[in-house]
Amino acid sequence: MITDKAYRELEEAVGAENVSREPAVLDCYAWQPFANDNPERWVIRPVAVVLPSTTGEVQEVVKALGRNGLKFKAFSTGWGAYSSVTGDDVVQVDLRRMNRIIDIDEKNMFAVLEPYVCGAQLQAEAMKVGLNTHIIGAGPSCSPLASATSGWGVGWDCVYMSYSGRNLLGAEWVLPDGEVLRLGTLGSGLGWFCGDGPGPSLRGIVRGSTGALSGLGIFTKAAVKLYNWPGPEQVRTEGLLLDAQSEVPDRLRFCMCFWPDRARQDEAVYKINESQLCYIFTRTGLGATVSIATPHLMKKLTGAGALKSALTRDLKWGSTLIMVADSDGEMAWKEGVLQEIARQYGGVVVNLTRARPIISMFLMNFLRSTAVPVVFRMGGQMFTALDRNETWDTQMDWAQMGETVKQRWIDRGGILDDMADNPYMTTYEDNCWAHCEEIFQYDPRNPDHLASLEPIFVEFSVEAIERCMEPLSSTDARLRKVISPMMGHYTSWQKKISASVDGNKTADTGMYCDEVDFDLSKIDPVMRKRFEKLIEARTWTEEGPPE
Amino acid sequence: MPLEEGLVFDVMASAYRHGVLDKFMSITGDALDSAILETGRRMGDLVNMLDEATERTVMRANGLLSHAGLLLKLAASDPVMSVASRSLEVNAVRNAVKGLLARRLVKAIEAQAGGGGRACGGV
């Protein structure tokens, strides 16, 4: 509930036309395309929405909310329910009027952005000057500032363009009390080239592993690192998604590699990455690719044993990669190295660049990450199970475990059949470390599917903890309360950080450090026993970790 | 002969080692270009047609593959693949394979388009 007084103060801060408490408008913010699976948990209507257009207006909004006992939750380009409010008396601060690319520094290879700039917009501008930007897996409609400052940040280009939090070179940060903090060189009036210092860096506090998801304030500008793009100023493209047709740059190769078994795949992946061949790299579950590109065909493959076997066993160990080069010599070298690695490990390289119509369709789907939303086609919704980013081997273990768990739920009719092996998997910085999340697809109109989501969430969480990994869905306040005591009581530190910048508790911290009880009584008894055993064995004492 | 696990990979590996896979990708690309030009369709249309393949078509393809063990074993052998590779270096052979592929593609596209037309006409 927002009082008339508080509402008037918001109107004074941004103009009456940029504030609303119309229920129909507010409900538009209460639903986001991803992870809106549980109405009780996610669909909370904000008490108002406010659209500031400058940092000064954001400050005024935050101060007004603090004065009136209300909270804020920032929203840039949306997509996941993570940008929605998590409790009562929260005002959604929609940053869509802050949509400018302020600067692209070609020489020093970075861009300064406002929150509503999206990945596609930045990529198009960066390519004009021979640069490119990291685009996250959620796709090019998402805000690079949001992932750099506030949440996750994996994408197929991480092999070359790293993880969003690592690309943050500076930020303008409106704290929950309305003051502005400028990070790194920006704070010393020296520009945007470095996000750290002077003195101890605050980037760890800003991002942690996941990001505070607006729980520590609102980021109004950020500098993100840009990377080399040796292609044309514009990749001419017509159409969208699977109807896209792009002009393929000469010095670009799009290859699918297949390996005879996991051991040789893993070794080859290390070699490929250490050789710095890739611009895009992802492991390919071929069955999953079929389910995503041709979901109706997928359903007809159920009884087709030989075809399924070819897709899921013979061609199981596959990866997709894009190589680019600044010269013909460099490309020849890369192709030669890839061939040599294929020879060493008995692999197969399918150079799709030779089949022009196919690569023409796929190119921007990978280069701009536009293909990802296609995963919603099969059932209308998807969710994902993440573990901790770690070495490629540990991520492959997670992928194989995920496939086993998923197959059980597919057999029970709890989720859709996508041949189970459907990992969103990539390497960071030439495989310094790697990422795997197991995607599963479901139909939200199917009660059996909806009923399966919570048990699947619990099962994947237990599997992650058993592997001494933080389940990356730890934005869930229930799970956070369970796993924090197993991980050095990390939420107590988050709460101290929160208290130090937000004494008035003006930020919505539901996705950051709040905790609520996890009702374990509703979990399947076998799983509950595993869960309770872990809690008992792994909980830290005051002195430190358990023996 | 039923399909052994790994046989499809073995064929691809042999084709890759002998350069057949690269040659075949180029031929496939040319055939697709030709079929797209002739029918006025786009690659996305072809993917959608594949998506709409009937259960009968899928099971027929599955039946062919599941009984192709002997043929695939033969194809996976180095001597056979070596001959295939040398054959594909001959322009006449390349053009013949490309023409055959393109014709099959056009036929499949037109058949599906015709089927769709009849269905619409019946509504």
Image (spheres, coloured by chain):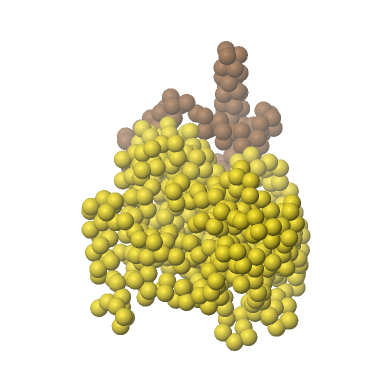
Chain colours: A yellow, B brown
In this view of the protein, which residue sits in the foreground, A17 or B93? A17
In this view of the protein, which residue sits in the foreground, A234 or A19? A19
Left or right of residue A112: residue A470: left
Name the quarter where the N terminus of chain A is drawn. Answer: bottom right
Residue A209 visible in the displayed image: yes
Residue A111 visible in the displayed image: no
Question: Looking at the rendering, which quadrant does residue A490 occupy?
Answer: bottom left
Percent of width and height locating residue A475: 46, 61
Q: Is residue B52 above or below residue A186?
A: above
Question: Looking at the rendering, which quadrant does residue A110 occupy?
Answer: bottom right
Name the quarter where the C terminus of chain A is drawn. Answer: bottom left
Tally of numbered tags = 0
Percent of width and height locating residue A2: 59, 55
Instruction: Identify the residue shown where x is 56% and y is 26%.
Output: B108
Q: Is residue A296 above or below residue A262?
A: above
Q: Residue furthest bottom?
A: A199
Instruction: Identify the residue shown where x is 50% and y is 40%.
Output: A380
Percent of width and height locating residue A503: 53, 74
Question: Looking at the rendering, which quadrant does residue B47 occupy?
Answer: top right
Q: Residue furthest top?
A: B122
In this view of the protein, which residue sits in the foreground, A60 or A364? A60
Left or right of residue A202: residue A446: left
Instruction: Identify the residue shown where x is 25% and y is 68%.
Output: A536
In this view of the protein, which residue sits in the foreground, B89 or A105? A105
Left or right of residue A525: residue A161: right
Instruction: Identify the residue shown where x is 60% and y is 67%.
Output: A66
Percent of width and height locating residue B72: 40, 39
